[in-house]
Image: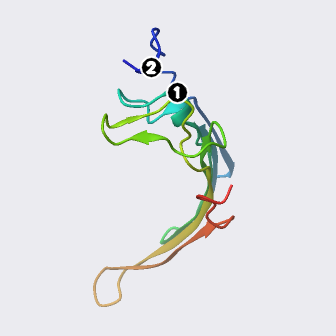
Amino acid sequence: GYPYDQATEIPSDQKEPYVYAKLTYQPGPTAKLYFSYNYSDNIMNHREATLDYVESATWKQESASHGFNFDWSHTFNNSFFGNLKIASAPVNFNLIRKNDNPIYYDVGTEKYLSGSSAGYTDINKRSRLQFQTDFTLFIDDFIGHHEWKAGLEGAVNVLFVPETRGRL
Protein backbone atom coordinates (compact mmCIF):
# COMPACT_ATOMS: atom_id res chain seq x y z
CA GLY A 1 0.00 0.00 0.00
CA TYR A 2 0.87 3.66 -0.07
CA PRO A 3 2.84 4.92 1.71
CA TYR A 4 5.01 1.95 2.59
CA ASP A 5 6.45 3.63 5.72
CA GLN A 6 3.12 4.04 7.56
CA ALA A 7 0.79 1.50 9.11
CA THR A 8 -2.31 3.15 7.64
CA GLU A 9 -2.67 3.46 3.89
CA ILE A 10 -3.69 6.80 2.40
CA PRO A 11 -6.60 6.42 -0.02
CA SER A 12 -6.58 7.95 -3.45
CA ASP A 13 -8.19 11.37 -3.39
CA GLN A 14 -8.37 12.27 -7.07
CA LYS A 15 -11.24 14.67 -7.82
CA GLU A 16 -12.31 15.70 -11.30
CA PRO A 17 -15.02 18.39 -11.16
CA TYR A 18 -16.62 19.36 -14.46
CA VAL A 19 -19.04 22.20 -15.18
CA TYR A 20 -20.56 23.02 -18.57
CA ALA A 21 -22.99 25.75 -19.62
CA LYS A 22 -24.32 26.66 -23.05
CA LEU A 23 -26.44 29.56 -24.24
CA THR A 24 -28.01 29.64 -27.69
CA TYR A 25 -29.55 32.84 -29.02
CA GLN A 26 -31.23 33.48 -32.35
CA PRO A 27 -31.50 37.26 -32.87
CA GLY A 28 -33.36 36.79 -36.16
CA PRO A 29 -34.24 34.17 -38.77
CA THR A 30 -30.82 34.48 -40.47
CA ALA A 31 -28.42 34.31 -37.53
CA LYS A 32 -27.61 32.10 -34.54
CA LEU A 33 -25.20 32.73 -31.68
CA TYR A 34 -23.80 30.08 -29.35
CA PHE A 35 -21.84 30.75 -26.19
CA SER A 36 -20.43 27.99 -24.06
CA TYR A 37 -18.20 27.63 -21.02
CA ASN A 38 -16.68 24.60 -19.38
CA TYR A 39 -14.52 24.12 -16.33
CA SER A 40 -12.61 21.01 -15.42
CA ASP A 41 -9.88 20.16 -12.98
CA ASN A 42 -7.83 17.20 -11.88
CA ILE A 43 -7.11 17.68 -8.19
CA MET A 44 -4.80 15.24 -6.40
CA ASN A 45 -2.99 15.53 -3.10
CA HIS A 46 -0.83 12.47 -3.73
CA ARG A 47 0.26 12.48 -7.39
CA GLU A 48 2.83 9.72 -8.08
CA ALA A 49 1.67 7.68 -5.06
CA THR A 50 3.01 4.15 -5.51
CA LEU A 51 4.33 1.34 -3.35
CA ASP A 52 7.85 2.79 -3.22
CA TYR A 53 6.90 6.38 -2.31
CA VAL A 54 6.50 8.12 1.01
CA GLU A 55 3.76 10.72 1.37
CA SER A 56 6.18 13.68 1.44
CA ALA A 57 7.67 12.65 -1.93
CA THR A 58 4.39 13.10 -3.80
CA TRP A 59 3.02 16.26 -5.41
CA LYS A 60 -0.16 18.18 -4.96
CA GLN A 61 -1.64 18.61 -8.45
CA GLU A 62 -3.97 21.38 -9.59
CA SER A 63 -4.99 21.32 -13.23
CA ALA A 64 -7.77 23.87 -13.67
CA SER A 65 -8.95 24.36 -17.24
CA HIS A 66 -11.49 26.87 -18.51
CA GLY A 67 -12.98 26.65 -21.99
CA PHE A 68 -14.77 29.52 -23.70
CA ASN A 69 -16.49 29.16 -27.05
CA PHE A 70 -18.34 31.59 -29.32
CA ASP A 71 -20.02 30.49 -32.55
CA TRP A 72 -21.87 32.74 -35.01
CA SER A 73 -23.76 31.37 -38.00
CA HIS A 74 -25.37 33.67 -40.53
CA THR A 75 -27.34 33.18 -43.73
CA PHE A 76 -26.76 36.20 -45.97
CA ASN A 77 -29.21 35.06 -48.66
CA ASN A 78 -30.59 31.81 -50.11
CA SER A 79 -27.24 30.85 -51.66
CA PHE A 80 -24.63 32.36 -49.29
CA PHE A 81 -23.94 31.55 -45.63
CA GLY A 82 -21.05 31.62 -43.21
CA ASN A 83 -19.77 30.68 -39.77
CA LEU A 84 -17.32 32.22 -37.32
CA LYS A 85 -15.97 30.30 -34.33
CA ILE A 86 -13.66 31.59 -31.62
CA ALA A 87 -12.49 29.52 -28.67
CA SER A 88 -10.09 29.97 -25.79
CA ALA A 89 -8.76 27.38 -23.38
CA PRO A 90 -6.63 28.72 -20.52
CA VAL A 91 -5.09 25.80 -18.63
CA ASN A 92 -3.08 25.50 -15.43
CA PHE A 93 -1.06 22.34 -14.89
CA ASN A 94 0.66 22.77 -11.55
CA LEU A 95 2.67 20.19 -9.62
CA ILE A 96 3.47 21.50 -6.15
CA ARG A 97 6.03 19.79 -3.92
CA LYS A 98 5.10 19.27 -0.29
CA ASN A 99 8.36 20.43 1.31
CA ASP A 100 11.71 22.01 0.48
CA ASN A 101 13.83 18.94 1.24
CA PRO A 102 15.90 17.22 -1.41
CA ILE A 103 14.93 13.85 -2.84
CA TYR A 104 16.06 11.02 -0.52
CA TYR A 105 16.15 7.74 -2.43
CA ASP A 106 17.62 4.42 -1.31
CA VAL A 107 19.13 2.72 -4.33
CA GLY A 108 19.41 -0.62 -2.49
CA THR A 109 15.70 -0.85 -1.63
CA GLU A 110 14.55 1.28 -4.59
CA LYS A 111 12.34 3.33 -2.26
CA TYR A 112 11.99 6.99 -1.37
CA LEU A 113 12.90 7.73 2.22
CA SER A 114 10.92 9.52 4.93
CA GLY A 115 11.11 13.31 4.67
CA SER A 116 11.90 13.15 0.98
CA SER A 117 10.53 15.73 -1.42
CA ALA A 118 9.11 15.42 -4.93
CA GLY A 119 12.15 17.53 -5.81
CA TYR A 120 10.63 20.52 -7.55
CA THR A 121 7.49 22.56 -8.07
CA ASP A 122 6.38 22.90 -11.67
CA ILE A 123 3.93 25.69 -12.53
CA ASN A 124 2.59 25.56 -16.09
CA LYS A 125 0.07 28.13 -17.24
CA ARG A 126 -0.88 27.57 -20.87
CA SER A 127 -3.52 28.96 -23.12
CA ARG A 128 -4.87 28.21 -26.54
CA LEU A 129 -6.79 30.67 -28.67
CA GLN A 130 -8.26 29.45 -31.91
CA PHE A 131 -10.54 30.81 -34.59
CA GLN A 132 -12.20 29.41 -37.65
CA THR A 133 -14.37 30.97 -40.29
CA ASP A 134 -15.92 29.55 -43.41
CA PHE A 135 -18.28 30.71 -46.12
CA THR A 136 -20.27 28.76 -48.68
CA LEU A 137 -21.71 30.15 -51.91
CA PHE A 138 -24.01 28.19 -54.21
CA ILE A 139 -24.08 29.35 -57.84
CA ASP A 140 -26.86 27.99 -60.05
CA ASP A 141 -27.27 28.30 -63.77
CA PHE A 142 -23.66 29.29 -64.49
CA ILE A 143 -22.38 26.43 -66.61
CA GLY A 144 -24.20 24.02 -64.30
CA HIS A 145 -24.53 24.03 -60.51
CA HIS A 146 -21.53 24.93 -58.34
CA GLU A 147 -20.69 25.16 -54.69
CA TRP A 148 -17.81 27.45 -53.69
CA LYS A 149 -16.27 27.24 -50.24
CA ALA A 150 -13.66 29.38 -48.60
CA GLY A 151 -12.38 29.41 -45.06
CA LEU A 152 -9.67 30.50 -42.70
CA GLU A 153 -8.44 28.80 -39.58
CA GLY A 154 -5.79 29.64 -37.05
CA ALA A 155 -4.58 28.90 -33.56
CA VAL A 156 -2.21 30.51 -31.08
CA ASN A 157 -0.68 28.62 -28.18
CA VAL A 158 0.71 30.76 -25.39
CA LEU A 159 2.83 29.81 -22.40
CA PHE A 160 2.18 32.62 -19.92
CA VAL A 161 5.02 31.88 -17.52
CA PRO A 162 8.46 30.49 -18.22
CA GLU A 163 8.94 26.91 -17.13
CA THR A 164 9.46 26.83 -13.37
CA ARG A 165 10.58 23.22 -13.01
CA GLY A 166 13.34 23.11 -10.45
CA ARG A 167 13.34 26.86 -9.87
CA LEU A 168 10.82 27.20 -7.05
Q: Looking at the image, which is closer to me, 157 or 163?
A: 163
Query: In the image, what residue type sits under mark 2?
Result: Asp
Rounded to the nearest angstrom, the CA distance separating label 1 from label 2 is 9 Å
Residue 75 visible to an observer of this rendering = no
Element type at mark 1: helix
Which residue in the structure is indicated by mark 2? 5
Q: To which quarter of the image does residue 144 belong?
A: bottom left
Q: Looking at the image, which is closer to me, 78 or 57?
A: 57
Return the x and y of residue 75 as percentages of the image width and height.
57, 64
Return the x and y of residue 153 as percentages of the image width and height.
50, 74
Which residue in the structure is indicated by mark 1? 55
Who comes first in sequence, dot 1 or dot 2? 2
Query: In the image, what residue type sits under mark 1?
Result: Glu
Q: Residue furthest bottom?
A: 143
Q: Which mark is residue 141?
A: none
Return the x and y of residue 22 as percentages of the image width and height.
62, 39
Q: Residue furthest right?
A: 27
Q: Looking at the image, which is closer to me, 139 or 98?
A: 98
Return the x and y of residue 72 as percentages of the image width and height.
62, 59
